[in-house]
Amino acid sequence: MVRTDALPFLERTDWQNRAMTSVGGKRARSLTPVETAQASVMGALSAALAIVSVVVPFAGGLSLLVTVPMGLLGYRYRLRVLLAATFAASAIGFVIAGISGFMVVLNCAYVGGLTGIIKRRGGGAPTVIAVSIVAGVLNGLLIIAALTVLVRLRTLALDAIAANIDGMLNAISAVPLLRESAEQTRVITAAILRNWPVLIMFNSIFSIMLVSVVGWWALSRVLDRLRGIPDVHKLEAVTEPGPVVPLPIRMSQARFRYPGADHDALAPLSLTIASGEHVAVVGANGSGKTTLMLLLCGRPPTSGRIDRPGAIGLGQLGGTAVVMQHPESGVLGTRVADDVVWGLPPGTRTDVAGLLGEVGLAGMEERDTGGLSGGELQRLAVAAALARQPAVLIADEITSMVDQRGREALLGVLSGLADRRKMALVHITHYNNEAEIADRTVNLSDSVDNMVMVGSTAPPAPTATPIPTPALSNAVPVLYVDRVGHVYGSGTPWAKTALRDVSFTVNEGDGVLIHGGNGSGKSTLAWIMAGLTKPTTGSCLVRSRPAHEHVGDVAIAFQAARLQLLRSRVDLEVASAAGFSPWDTHRVVSALATVGLDGSLARRRVDQLSGGQMRRVAIAGLLARRPQALILDEPLAGLDAASQRGLLRLLTELRLNTGLTVVVISHDFAGLEELCPRILHLENGMVAPASRATGAAGGVS
Amino acid sequence: MSATRQRRPVVLLRPVPGTSVIHQLWAGTKLIVVVVISILLAFYPGWIVIGLMAALVGIAIWLAHIPRGAMPSIPWWVWILLLFGAVTATLGGGEPILRLWSLDLEVGGLLKFLRITALSIVLLALGAMVSWTTNVADVAPAIATLGRPLRPLRIPVDDWAVVLALALRAFPMLLDEFRLLYAARRLRPRAVLPDGRAKRRRWFTDMVDLLAAGVTVALRRADEMGDAITARGGTGQIAAAPSRPRRADWVALTICAAVCALAMVLEIKGLG
């Protein structure tokens, strides 16, 4: 959850206050990139909710809330977007959960869309009820019409229902006392089933009204919550006339200030970028690295000039290509080959195999992008950028969320690329060894001591012994992992072994780093230690009790801190996670103080916190329950250098001063030596032997 | 330490590894077959049609080499519900009457119950067959091809196909996020509440909290995805390989059409 950290000076427009999508003229236009993305993600969200409500037993109540994502779309965007999302969601519903999934999605889109549109038009609860009655009548008529045509299906269904009811009543009338009422019920149900259209009509009106009212209520609550969410979308498509010739770029005293900000996001900068150059852009957080990327992509500077011979052509053939920070979000195709060509004009021929070979992914055309590691995803994104044969390629901190090995492979792809492809490469980074491979470096920070760049550390030798041997005589074991193995989907054709025969002990006050690359099984191990997953074989004991029977004894802080913060405000969140009353201000403040946060933050909305603060609030809530141990899954990922140092110092102090047992799950070593003196290497689900692990992790792949 | 017997989970949107004639069929063919069979069963849900369609689906599943393990474990309460339904339907009686030695059994109700259960199972198997043998990446391009005739009606088929493709890409990521949300909720202490009303209210506020967290994450994902689309210069191609039927597809479609026609004729004649 970096975004607010990494982009401190981007506009934070309220999500709700974004301008309504303009509908240009009378003719409906195709969906814009933002609309397309919103429609797909919200469509997927409502499909996921609907499927969970159909597939998981007793989760039917959830289907009342499936209306919310569609309601949001109806509220925010034009009808076209809602229709596209409905189509996508119902198609997914159909493929996964058959007709019932399809019907749930369709109904929820219908009701949700209506409530969203009413909300946008400023209607109130009475309007919702009135409209839902009309909608219910229309829906009922539709079903009656369908069943009138499908005579045999209707007869079969009604007969089957009648048989079940009759049977039940027959059984009941065996009891003499109940015979009379059973006979009455029989007459009534028979009459109702004979007049099935009436039954269907009432049912339709009632259910649509219920779903509408609940959906309306939930939508209003959720919209209230979304008020403070910053808009993190950055790129704007610019329509520009003329041929695409972005190079050479000449910036003279170009400066940028966001509207309403009190200082420049980018100080006046003069710069020329020509073909064949590899330029590294470095600078501290907030020095304007990302802003420079936006200017190169076509945002007009606040003052100064940026000259180019022709159009920028963002994403066009021969234009400007961008690869951004988040590996998962940058990849749009489900299959590797599809992602390379994604978005190219229809009919463009692309040498997919050649491009994949160039970025070191040769032969992976048919692979599913869902199974790629962060580093592979980023190389794939580079291949997709190169498929546009760009004149300029901008790589914006593309290695910051990638592990050591992935970083080295990515740098291998980038080095020499500008020369080979006769294009300009603008490489924005905060790693010092990455700037070294460039032809020249542009430093955006003024002062030298402000230039904190993260160095990458060579892996130290593992120190944790795989065999549980108490190191000290007075060591008290907290976590005892005994021959744990785990298989996902065991017994199915998709079975995948995540862990094999892992044994180790974590003692009280220990600091252990569980280190491993992508797919090494380290996250599975973390979930097992927290009791969230029951291992297929072996056992994990917390103070000699099975972990999965005592969820909550061992705290775990997830990498995606935002998902762990379920309440809207900091004090509510901490109180709910720790299990005390939110009015207990004293305890809330002291819990926040434990993680070095000021008590004044207690009333702050969760969505207004920075990435580092979110992580600290999550840890505060967990620690307030006095857990046996604290597991941190990639605690440093996505934080800037200063926040990383602060968090590490805090955790180290907590461990040394309060005796907190800390287990860190990470693919990196940098700066963790003091927090975690013991290291356990995981490789392919097994504890790697000490002698091999050093070489393997340190080697360049 | 013996391996604990695990329930086989429902695996979503992932084809059974390996390849077969059915795996290699065009995704559009499989979608057409599903739609045609569903419509046929909706109009003529008789034993003959159900039986023939079950045979068709069964043969397809056999051809696709689907192992038994692909089927998720059926929870016990489904069996209980089925049993309860069967018993009450039998007690309902009705024509025809089955003579067993000296016992007269009215099995009409039971037969109707069995027929509607069989119908549901065939429909479920039909859907499962498609998801077991189809790569999700092939679905959206196939729909774009199938929807081509709708273009003159000003239905934005291409936009829809793009949105579907991206939704399928986002879907597993969102499921992962739900898994995390659920885990985060499990880690919290449970509030002790006095009565049912307070519990219900808490359930709803909890749900709204979860939903708000989920929507927040989804919005961020959508923002980033929008950026990624802009960076690619807007929408365009969605697949590297062309999506169209081949000879095997025409064969499969012909077989399906023939069986459906046969089933319809038999059903109409059989019922007089």
Image (cartoon, coloured by chain):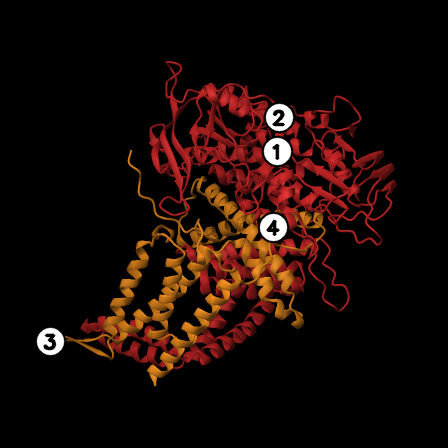
In this image, A392 relative to A343: left or right?
right
Q: Say which chain is orange.
A: B
Q: Is residue A324 above or below residue A415?
A: below
Mark 2 — on which chain does it sit?
A: A
Q: Residue furthest left?
A: B102
Which residue position is annotated with label 4?
Answer: A338
Mark 3 — on which chain does it sit?
A: B
Q: CA distance from mark 3 to mark 1?
A: 80 Å
Percent coordinates x, y for residue A216 in the rendering: 56, 61
Q: Residue furthest top?
A: A473
Percent coordinates x, y for residue A625 in the rendering: 46, 33
CB under 8 Å between discs 4 and 1:
no
Number of residues whose C-alpha sits closer than 10 Å to that of mark 2, classed few (under 14), some (14–19) or many (20 or more): few
Q: CA distance from mark 4 to mark 1?
A: 36 Å
CB under 8 Å between discs 2 and 3:
no
**Which element carries disc 3, helix, strand or loop?**
loop
Q: Residue at x 45, y 30 (%)?
A: A626
Number of residues whose C-alpha sits closer than 10 Å to that of mark 1, classed few (under 14), some (14–19) or many (20 or more): many
CB under 8 Å between discs 1 and 2:
yes
Which residue position is annotated with label 3?
Answer: B102
Which residue position is annotated with label 1?
Answer: A612
Q: Looking at the image, is mark 2 or mark 3 nearer the viewer?
A: 3
Amino acid type, mark 2: Gly
Of A306 and A226, which appears nearest the observer?
A306
Q: Looking at the image, is mark 3 or mark 4 nearer the viewer?
A: 4
Amino acid type, mark 3: Ser
Q: Which mark is residue A646?
A: 2
Chain A shade: red
Q: CA distance from mark 3 to mark 4?
A: 68 Å
